[in-house]
Amino acid sequence: MGLKIDMPEPNGGRLVDRVVKKPEIGAKMAAGCPAFDIKPTMFKGSPIRNVYREIVSICYGFFSPVEGSMVREEVERVLKERRLLNDCIFPYPLVFDITEEDLKGLGVEEGDRLLLRLKGQPFAVIDIEEIYKIDTDDLATRTFGTPENNPEVVREPFNEKHPGYVIYKSLNPYVIGGKFFIVNPPKFREPFDRFWFPPAEARKEFKNKGWRTVIAHQTRNVPHVGHEFLMKNAAYMGDTEPCHGIVVNAIIGAKRLGDYPDEAIIEAHAATNEGKYIKPERHMVTFTLWDMRYGNPIESLLHGIIRQNMGVSWHMFGRDHAAVGEFYDEYATQILWGEGIPSFGFEAPPTDVYAGLKIRPQNMQEFWYCPVCGEIAYKGNCGHIDEKQKFSGSFIRGMVREGVFPPKVIMRPEVYKAVVKWWKKFNYPFVNSAYLEYKNKEGEFDLPAMEVSEKR
Amino acid sequence: MAYNMALLLDSARKEKIKGTPVEQQIQKLFGGEVEAVIMEIPEEHAKKILDEFTTARIDSRGFLEDIPVALKRAIFSEVASKGSTGPEVLDATLAKLDEIKEEAKKESEYIPPPEI
């Protein structure tokens, strides 16, 4: 048996690529189609999800082998077994939802092609396979589980305090199922453009860098020194040598009040290598468009799939991975990847089941500052439990809010400067209602002007 | 269950508690890079703060965080004037809740960025 690990194949064996690169072909595909302007999913007056991010991530292959908005039978299988109709693992229902009024106004039916516009421009088309009604309460509950049905890891019934539950509950009642094509590819704006590595490009980039083994760090936050130590230490795992590369993949999408703006998150991570705390030759920042569902073990499956599709060999998972509140066991993700969660369809870890994932988990404990050791210490090593000083993102946010320059043992100065750069732009260090409005209007990219004929 | 709150100290704040019993409570964190007074927040006060300020939360250390600067500033002001971190500080602070919420509202729209 060889010990060296090769780049894993994509989930399902091939990367999805549903992006039409030539505008004239895109315009031709959209010609004569009824058109619909994409709208955000709203909750209490705030945009909490926008389906265009799912369309981008599907068509560029981040969610391979998913190719579109799921048909009813596929949604059911995902909810029951976390598998697609082709047996590949996938954790979340992905649907293009629409109101009854909009559906009637469009007058479309199965077999039709619908043009989806964004920011007034043609963006994508969907080839309609099925139109069906959903029960959003049921969908929201079954997506995340219940203490009765998933007693291994669900601790509290989900409710409106959970942002992912609220996304599913707030969907429109009708779904148009079918495959997407992006007919007018997005042009990412600064600062996102320099971090845009869809799976096919990420794989090429890893090869160009000579990276055989790569470990992924999931983030939705500005990095503090605890995150930096997590990345550096988790990367000692590799094969015959530590991982060649560390890839930060930021989840960019709808934000909660009080989070850092996406622009600050992504540039702050880049500042970690620009400041050489991790050599730029070994560290790469990327992103995926997705409105986080905060589904802890369920979300970790999506993270595993995205990063496997990007060609990543290992994924670090910590305590409370992609979690909010106390709905799940704080180690639910590590339970899934360590032993499986039968009630969610995994009798064994997702790597050890039929058509399993090829990315390998690196379940990590946390890092803290230990005044006795006089250094940043790993929970698995440091026995000074009573003396530990934990890194807390909210403690650091409080420091930032009060105008205190964080000491470099907590946040690197380059990272803080990236936060301040975007603070100056938005007049606020965190997400507030003005940022939400900006984000909803501008998104992350622009679309070139495209003329589409009304006739086929 | 009681929670905690960390009041960060700079030189101006340290001057204000100089000579009071609170000075003895100063803790050095992260190798002495951060100085703070850690005060206990009884459950009923914590609940009130969580109810009144939607962003407020208890973090993984059991600390009350993500609260407006206006509230922290008001609590520190009472700590300095009373020379205590006891529950009477929170009673006095929360008696001015309307005023604090008004300040906090402004703070949700604009916080001046530091000049660095």
Image (cartoon, coloured by chain):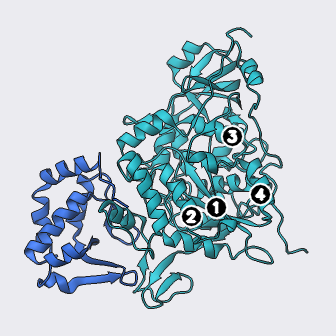
Residue at mark 3 to residue at mark 1: CA–CA distance: 26 Å
What subunit carries mark 4? Answer: A
Q: Specify the colour of chain A.
A: cyan
Is label 4 on the same chain as label 2?
yes
Which structural element holds mark 4? loop
Residue assigned mark 1:
A341
Residue found at the far front of this picture: B116
What subunit carries mark 1? Answer: A
Residue at mark 4 to residue at mark 2: CA–CA distance: 19 Å
* Amino acid carrying mark 3 in the image: Ile
Which residue is at a point 46% across and 36% down the rendered structure image?
Answer: A440
Residue assigned mark 4:
A356
Which structural element holds mark 2? helix
**Image coordinates for residue A153, horizontal then vertical, percent:** 54, 62
User: The C terminus of chain A appears in which quarter of the rendering?
Assistant: top right
Residue at mark 2 to residue at mark 3: CA–CA distance: 26 Å
* Amino acid carrying mark 1 in the image: Ile
Residue assigned mark 3:
A58
